[in-house]
Image: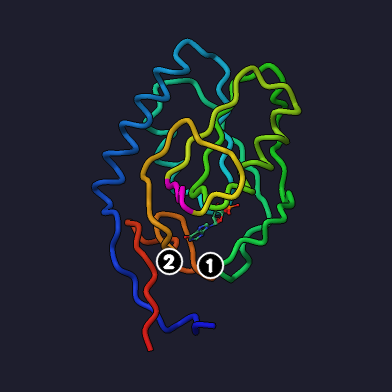
Amino acid sequence: MPQEDNYVIDQMISAKSIAARVESLAFEISDYFKGTDKLVVVGLLRGSFVFIADLVRELDLPVEVDFLETSSYGDGMESSREVRILKDIRGEIAGRDILVVEDIVDTGHTLNHVVKLLQSRNPARLEVCALLNKAARREVDITARWVGFEIPDEFVVGYGIDYAQRNRNLDHIGKVRFIK
Ligand code: IMP
């Protein structure tokens, strides 16, 4: 098992590229939900907090923001595959348009669980926007309508995403590389 301090971070996606992509995603999402007066943006804590903050400010729609937290990787790098809700959303969503915002779709278990849970509450429409997609790692059949970047099977940090709770405050996405 690698030591948590024995690593460097190699830049994968620059802050500038992220900003440009967030702008174009927001444009597409605003167009898709055009005319809605009831979009609830549901961010999955904690990894999506930076992304959701930037995304909602670019949306040309009336939005409400809510958050949901699931059990995570803990401080490790492997998915537990067992998803538990640690914090549910506050608002009612029946009949409302929902945009779920996720940082990374990896095995897909988290998103699958959350989408099923929210669908059971009968929203009008429910779509997903994920900043990053690791398609090679998928174990369940779930896709996000909008994906910021397709990435290879690497462990990444930054722009809200952590390794052992650190590096969330990096302005770019980097990949973790272990050193001796
Ligand atoms: P999934 O259930 O396997 O799709 O895992 C999704 C969650 O695992 C994401 O929301 C992240 O919190 C976490 N995760 C997946 N890949 C990474 C990574 O490369 N770095 C940090 N967290 C990750």
Residue 172 against residue 20 in the figure, above or below: below
Residue of label 1: 165
Q: Residue at x 40, y 27 (%)?
A: 59
- Quadrant where the N terminus sits is bottom right
Image position of 62 (left or right of 177): right
Q: Residues under labels 2 and 1: Cα distance? A: 7 Å
For disc 1, the neighbor class at 10 Å (few under 14, some 14 to 19, many from 20) is some
Tell which quarter ligand 1 is in.
bottom right
- Quadrant where the C terminus sits is bottom left
* Observer-nearest of 30 and 132: 132
For residue 89, which quarter of the picture? Answer: top right
* Residue stretch in magenta: 132-136
* Observer-nearest of 1 and 60: 1
* Residue 57 percent across, percent down from the top left: 40, 33
Residue type, label 1:
Gln
Ligand 1 within 8 Å of disc 1? The answer is no
How is colour applied across the structure in the image?
Answer: rainbow
Q: Which mark is residue 110?
A: none
* Residue 92 percent across, percent down from the top left: 72, 26
Residue of label 2: 167
Residue 24 against residue 43 in the figure, above or below: above
* Residue 170 percent across, percent down from the top left: 36, 61
Residue type, label 2:
Asn
* Residue 152 percent across, percent down from the top left: 38, 56
